Image (tube, rainbow, N blue to C red):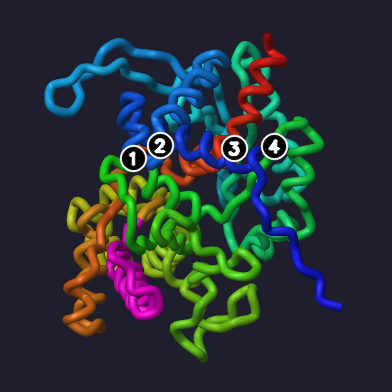
Amino acid sequence: MKVFKKTGTNQEDIQEMNRSLVIRLLRKLQICSRADLAKKTGLKQATITYIINDFIECGLVKETGYIDGEKGRRSIGITLNSEKYKVIGVRLTRKYFSVGVYDITGTEYDVLPVEIDIVLGSQVVLSQIKKVISNILNKYEQDIILGIGMAIPGPFFKNEGRIGLMTEFPGWEKIYLEDELKEAFNLPVFLEHDANLGALAEWWLASNIRDSGTMVYIAAGQGIGAGIVIDGKVFRGALGVAGEIGHTSISFDGPLCECGNRGCLDLYISTTALIRDIKSELHNNNTSILKDGFSMPDVIKAVEAGDELAEKALYKVAWYLGFGLVNVINNFNPDIIIIGDELTRFGNYLLDTVRNTVKKHTLPGIYNKVDIEISTFVNDQILVGAGALAADMILKKPSTLIKIDEIAL
């Protein structure tokens, strides 16, 4: 017998959706009037007044004084009382993890990066993450901490709350991170693929805020992944692993990847691949300014100085990245592609090669309709995105905030 799911919407659901619509719009506009909210949401003025009065009473919203409106009219401005509420963002990578503190508008208050020794194993690193989060909670004990958002390298099985595979760092696939953090801190926990969070940060918090279209964010760092945002919503696929371009193959007889496939993009496009290629040639090159034990900042300086070995290695990585983006463009037809994460520290040295490669291997009518840019975020946009995820999920249910304030009072 076929069972039909309940899809009806009651009055409480409608009130919650209206509250969420208003509060998320307030976060985007920062300061506006009640009339602005009514116009942009399509809600009646009386409904807006009722919602805002509730928010002011619980301390979520505050008035800012008079602001100029249309036709010279002056209205009382309102804004989120964002300093009162904090969220924790966590980013896990193969070589480090970071824990940050943000308010519900995305303002950053604290960031604690910790280098990882993979020899210690995933369980030890998880304990280190928990310890840093615990220290943060103690430091901000006077604030209201709403939840934890965490950025995870892919493939990430969102429905299961665990990593499918972290190349070069095994053991994480056995850890159910969402359950671990919920049990440790008794807070709402939200996990997401790191590229998806970079995409969300770019969509909602970058200076050029977007309302519609298709954007692909490329996380090009210690691995490579894509976050796909369509009209403000992340496209995740059936299991939550959509955008896992790091394990798409560009060479059927290429080197074997840990995922079992051959010639995966992850093997060619990363800071790890860049450093590996330079090391393999360094002892055969007497002219390079790079020496044994060099780091990424050293490679950046070498490229800027015109070092032939460093330039050649970077060109190779950028060329492969360009080919990866050709596939992304043909599959998703985005309006814009934004490249973020560690490789973007090379700036136009990377971007020029990427654009030229894409242009050469894409139909002109398609290439001319897609922008390829480097992220303008000063801070780590993936970590910012982790904090934004927690805030966004909480703001979908503003009644939670009202209840928290009632308990606090």
Q: Which residue is mark 3?
A: 16
Task: Give the residue furthest to the left.
Answer: 71
Residues under numbered marks 1 and 2 in contact, where contact means CB atoms less than 8 Å apart? yes
Q: Looking at the figure, which quarter contains the N terminus?
A: bottom right
Q: Position of residue 185 (x, y in %)?
A: 75, 30
Query: Most prominent secondary structure in the magenta stretch?
Result: helix
| Residue at the disc numbered 1 | 40
Residue position for label 2: 25
Residue type of the residue flagged with mark 1 = Lys
Determine whether label 4 and label 1 are within 8 Å by CB: no
Quarter-of-image position of residue 317: bottom left
Point out the tag, 3 or 1, that comes first from the N-terminus. 3
Question: How far is the residue under mark 1 from the one under mark 2?
Answer: 8 Å
Circles 2, 3 touching at the beta carbon (< 8 Å):
no
Residue 98 visible in the current orientation: no
Residues at marks 2 and 4 touching, judged by CB atoms closer than 8 Å: no
Q: Tag 2: residue type?
A: Leu
| Distance between mark 4 and mark 3 Cα atoms | 18 Å
Q: CA distance from mark 2 to mark 4?
A: 23 Å
Could one spot residue 277 in this view of the protein? Answer: yes
Q: Is residue 38 above or below residue 231?
A: above
Label 4 vs 3, first from the N-terminus: 3
Front: mark 1 or 2: 1
- First to last magenta residue range: 314-339
Residue at left offset 64%, top offset 33%: 147
Foreground disc of the pair 2, 4: 2
Q: N-terminal of the two: label 4 or label 1?
A: 1
